[in-house]
Every structure is written in structure tokens, then in C-alpha cells.
């Protein structure tokens, strides 16, 4: 079972496991999303871009980040709703073969009128194997609170 709202503290920091982004990930995401932009799917085309090689879709990086956060188990069975993403920035590309992980900090906490739910905002950074932040922003989540019965 994941953590409840009361188990978190402002400023608390977490680091997820890492994951390498491969060609299969990009191809599967292109098929799922319908985004077959050649900068992602065509090595010859991508070689002629300023990047010099194919790169992962920005939205793929964001999606993998949510999965890496889920792998921590912190919100298993206690997350109620993903409420939003604010100020998301794509700072650097994610290339095929890059290994990324997520670092996040509890940046705001607020109770709701519902005694069974609280709101957490997490400041999130996707970091590559070089220590570079490739994407960042705030993710807000509604989480269960402990209710005395």
C-alpha cells in the first residue's frame, strides 16, 4: 500500500529507479500516439537535423516519468486523481539509448474540504545519465488521507 497524505512532508525528496529509452519505446509510442515525425522515426532524416540523431518524443519522456514515479510504490492504492501538470519544460532532448530517472520533491501540500483527500504538488525533474535535467515541471496529485473510523 502506498503512503497517505499525512505520510508526506514539505521538502521531502524522492528518486525513482532508472530506465533506458530504446528504439522499441519510440516505435511503440509513435504507433500509440500516431506521431511518426521523422525526427523520431527516421535515422537518415534525423542525422540531418541539429540533433544529428533520432530523439524520443517529448511526451514519451513525460509518460515514462509517470511510470517511473509509479514504480516507487509511494502512491499505490492511495492516489485518487492526477490533477494536472504545470510549467512543464522540455530542456534537452532524450536520445535513443539515454537512461533517465526522476527526482521529485513535495513542494506544496493542502488539505481539502473532503477529510478523505489531500493535494500534493511535486516538483519533478527528469534526469539523464549525464546528470542533465531534460524535462521538469510540477505534477499535482490528489491522495487519500487517513480517516478515523
Image (cartoon, rainbow, N blue to C red):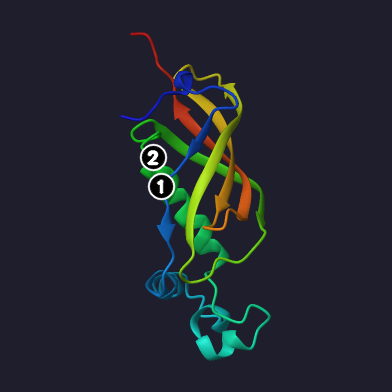
Residue 73 percent across, percent down from the top left: 36, 37
Quote the CA–CA distance across marks 2 and 1: 7 Å
Q: Residue furthest front?
A: 130
Sequence order check: which comes first, mark 2 or mark 1?
A: 1
The quarter holding residue 94 reads bottom right
Residue 12 percent across, percent down from the top left: 54, 28
Seen in the image, is 67 located left or right of residue 113?
Answer: left
The N terminus sits in image quarter: top left
Residue at the image position 46 percent from the left and 74 percent from the top: 30
Q: Residue furthest left?
A: 1
Mark 2: few/some/many CA within 10 Å (<14, 14-19, 20+): some
Q: Residue furthest bottom?
A: 44
Residue at the image position 57 percent from the left and 34 percent from the top: 105
Residue at which label 2 appears: 72
Say if mark 2 contacts mark 1, CB within 8 Å: yes
Residue at the image position 39 percent from the left and 26 percent from the top: 3
Amino acid at each position: 500500500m502506498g503512503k497517505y497524505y499525512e505520510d508526506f512532508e514539505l521538502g521531502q525528496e524522492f528518486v525513482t529507479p532508472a530506465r533506458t529509452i530504446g528504439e522499441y519505446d519510440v516505435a511503440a509510442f509513435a504507433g500509440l500516439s500516431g506521431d511518426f515525425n521523422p525526427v523520431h522515426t527516421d535515422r537518415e532524416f534525423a542525422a540531418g537535423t541539429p540533433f544529428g540523431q533520432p530523439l524520443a518524443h517529448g511526451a514519451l519522456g513525460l509518460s515514462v516519468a509517470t511510470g517511473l514515479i509509479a514504480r516507487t510504490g509511494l502512491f499505490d492504492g492511495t492516489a485518487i486523481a492526477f490533477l494536472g501538470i504545470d510549467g512543464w519544460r522540455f530542456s534537452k532532448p532524450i536520445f535513443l539509448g539515454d537512461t533517465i530517472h526522476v527526482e521529485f520533491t513535495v513542494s506544496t501540500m493542502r488539505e481539502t474540504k473532503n477529510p478523505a483527500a489531500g493535494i500534493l504538488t511535486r516538483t519533478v525533474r527528469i534526469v539523464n545519465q549525464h546528470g542533465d535535467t531534460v524535462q521538469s515541471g510540477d505534477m499535482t496529485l490528489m491522495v487519500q488521507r487517513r480517516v478515523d473510523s
